[in-house]
Image (cartoon, rainbow, N blue to C red):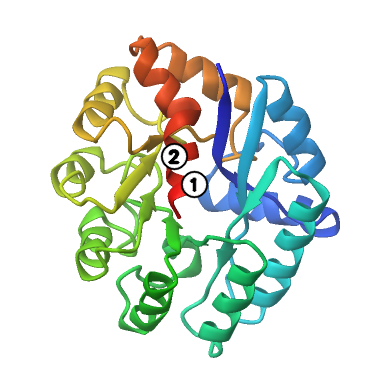
Amino acid sequence: MKIIDTHAHIFPEKIASAAVSNVGGFYSIDPMAHKGTSEDLLEAGGRIGTSKYLVFSTATTPKQVESIHNFIMSECEKHPEFVGAGTMHKDYENFEAEINRIKAAGMKGIKLHPDLQKFAIDDEKMMPVYEVLESLGMFVITHAGDPRYNYSHPSQVARVASAFPKMPIIAAHMGGWGMWDDARERLPRFENVFVDTCSTYSFAEAETLRKSINAFDSEKIFFATDYPMWDPESELEKILSLGLPEALLEKILSKNFERFYASI
């Protein structure tokens, strides 16, 4: 089966070790599964035959936005397997020009991690950013859900989805990490909400994941690994172990994202 990984974090070689350590500390994961570099991602994903990766990094300060974009664009030029997403910070001032810059470079969306960035996905300062993204036909992929915080609760994702119905939103972790019931209750009704599967198998029972998969439109679920947190081989084994119908599995592993990305 063809495989596309729709959620992979990459970092420049010189800071990868520190970046991976910081993320691992945020989630109390020690050690992280991989190094966080492009070359390591390609090696790890290659072991399961991954053909494409949606890659990104997250700006935790406004000054990181442009350097992250330059890095992601450079890596996408080097590696045809990569499609890149940008980032944004609520306090970055020249967001419209920068979003236009990354769109011109071929990026079709941005990645947010509200819990790591320490601002709510429905923060009023983000609304003009979403207006620009919606006007340009671009998407948002966002970390969703964390019981420790109130930045990306499924209800907050739902507020953004309702306010910007033409902006596709990929709500990671089946719409709400550790908030599976809330995600199933609030998000499937939105035509513009999609979900990915990463960082779910280690935190929810198989039956809970099957319920979540069944709650969403079968064409709006994307396979993802959350590299470098988890190993692609392990993540593939876990989704295969759910016993999903082959036609649904093929959609999740690649067909859904191919269709989605082509439509943007």
Q: Is residue 176 visible?
A: no
Question: In the shown orientation, is residue 238 left or right of residue 72?
Answer: left
Q: Is residue 88 visible?
A: yes
In the rendered view of the protein, which quadrant contains the C terminus?
bottom left
Q: Say few, some or many: other residues with alpha carbon within 10 Å of mark 2 (under 14 / 14 to 19 / 20 or more).
A: few
Query: Relative to residue 201, is residue 22 depicted above or below?
Result: below
Question: In the shown orientation, is residue 24 left or right of residue 120?
Answer: right
Q: How many marks?
A: 2
Q: Residue furthest right?
A: 14
Residue 122 place in picture, x, y as percent: 30, 71
Marks 1 and 2: CB-CB under 8 Å?
yes
Query: Relative to residue 122, is residue 146 depicted above or below?
Result: above
Question: In the shown orientation, is residue 165 left or right of residue 24?
Answer: left
Query: Relative to residue 47, is residue 223 depicted above or below?
Result: below
Q: Say few, some or many: other residues with alpha carbon within 10 Å of mark 1 (under 14 / 14 to 19 / 20 or more).
A: few
Amino acid under label 2?
Answer: Arg
Image quarter of residue 208: top left
Q: Which residue is mark 1?
A: 262
Image quarter of residue 34: top right
Residue 120 place in picture, x, y as percent: 35, 70
In the rendered view of the protein, which quadrant contains the N terminus?
top right
Observer-nearest residue: 204 or 54? 54
Q: Which residue is mark 2?
A: 259
Q: Which mark is residue 126?
A: none
Disc 1/disc 2 C-alpha distance (Å): 5 Å
